[in-house]
Image (cartoon, helix red, strand yellow):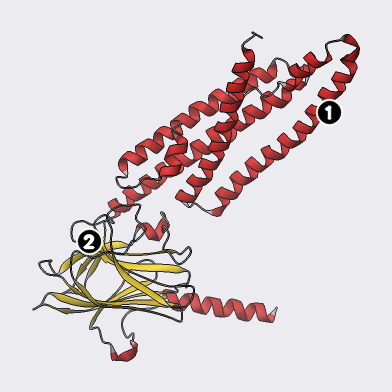
Amino acid sequence: MMKFLVSFLVLCLFMSAVHGQSCAGYTFSGNAFFPSCTDLPVLNSFLHWNYNQSSNSVQIAFRHVAASSDRWAAWALNPTGTGMMGAQALVAYQKSDGSMVVYTSPITGYATALQQGALSFPVTDLTASFDRNELIIFATLALGNLSSTLNQLWQEGPLSGDAPRMHSLTGPNMQSMGTLNLLSGTTVTHPASAGAVIDDKQRQRNIHGLLNAVGWGTLIPMGAIIARYLKVFESADPAWFYLHITCQISGYIIGVIGGATGLRLGAQSRGITFYAHRAIGIKDHKYRIYWNVYHHSIGYSIIILSIINIFKGLKILNPDQVWKKAYIGVIGSLGVIAVILEVYTWIVVIYRKKNMQGNGNGNENLNQEIDTGEV
C-alpha cells in the first residue's frame, strides 16, 4: 500500500511539473541561448527562437516535453495558409535502435505520411535530441521575403515500424496552430470559430461512423441471422420473414445515409483519401437455385466487407477505445449466437430427415431445410 501511495505521489508531482513548466528560465545544454520563447497552449510544447531581423533568419528550438520514444513530433511554418495544407515542417523522432531521425517535410495533402523533402525556404543546422522524455528540434530558417509574423503549427503522433503514422484527429491535436510574431514574441491561437469548424467536422465523422456501424455492421448481420436460423422454427413462420425484411431494409437505409455522410466528408476534405475504406464502401421456381446462390453470396459478402470497413473506419476516426470495444462486443455476441443457432439448426434438420425417411422425400425436405440462409 505504501509503495502504491509513493508511486501515485511521484506521478502527481511529475504531471504537475509538466503542466506547470514555462519556457522562461529554461537552460539548454551546450551553451545554446534563445532570447525569445513562448509556451505553446497544447501538446506540452514550447518554442524558443533567436531572430535576426537584418538577414530575416531565425534560429529555433522546438521542445516537446512528456514525450515518448515511440512517438514523433513536428513543428512547422505555413507561408500560404493557417492550416496543415502547405505547411513546411521539421519532423523528429527516436528510432527503435536509439538513433535520432530529423528531416524536413513539405505538407502537400491531408493524407501525408510526412515524407522527407525540401521546404520552400532554406533550412540549416537541423538537429534533434531526445533525453529524459524531452524531444528538441534545432534549426536555422532563412525566411527570405516572409514577414516577421508567421503561421505556425506543431504536432505529435505515433510511430509504427520507425515510421510516422497519422496523429489523432480530436482534441489538442486539432488545436495546435496559431500565429507567431518573431519581433514582439506574441503568439495567438486561431479563433474559436476555427475550433467550431473542427468540432463540426468531428461531429460529422462520428455520425458517419455510428450510422454505418448500426446499419451495415449490426442490422444487416442481424437480418441474416434471423433469416437463417428462425426459419427452422415452424412457430416463427412467417414472422421471421418480416423481421428479416425489417432489419435489412432499415440497415440498408441507415447505411446509405451513413455512406452519403462519408461522401460529403470526402468532398469537404480535399487531399484526404482513405482508398481501401472508400473502395469497400462503394460497392420455388426452377431457377430459384441461381437466385439463392446470388442472394447468399452477395449478402454474406456485404456483411463481411461491412465489418472489415467499420474497423477501418474506427482506425481512421481513432475514437475512445470504449467505442471499438462496444462494437467488438456487439458483433462478437452476434457471432456466438450464430454459432449456437447453426449447431441447433443442423440438429433439427437431421432429426427431421430421419423422421421423414419413410416418406420417400427425405432428401428433398432436407434440402429445403438447409436452404435457410436468406439474407
Residue 269 relative to residue 354: left or right: left
> Residue 121: image x %, image y %?
18, 67
Q: Which of 364 and 9 is in front in this view?
A: 364
> Residue 312: image x %, image y %?
50, 46
Residue 54 relative to residue 163: left or right: left
Distance CA(mark 1)–CA(mark 2) = 68 Å
Above-or-below relation of 372 to 343: above
Q: Residue at point 41% right, 68% down? A: 72
Query: Tag on residue 78?
Result: 2
Q: Considering only order in the chain, which callout, 2 or 1, is on the residue closer to the N terminus?
A: 2
Residue 302 relative to residue 29: left or right: right
Q: Residue at point 89% right, 20% down? A: 354
From the image, tell me which residue sits under label 1: 347
Above-or-below relation of 273 to 21: above
Q: Nearer the viewer, residue 341 or 215?
A: 341
Amino acid type of the residue tagged 2 in the rendering: Asn
Q: Residue at point 34% right, 59% down? A: 175
> Residue 344: image x %, image y %?
80, 30
Q: Nearer the viewer, residue 41 or 112?
A: 112
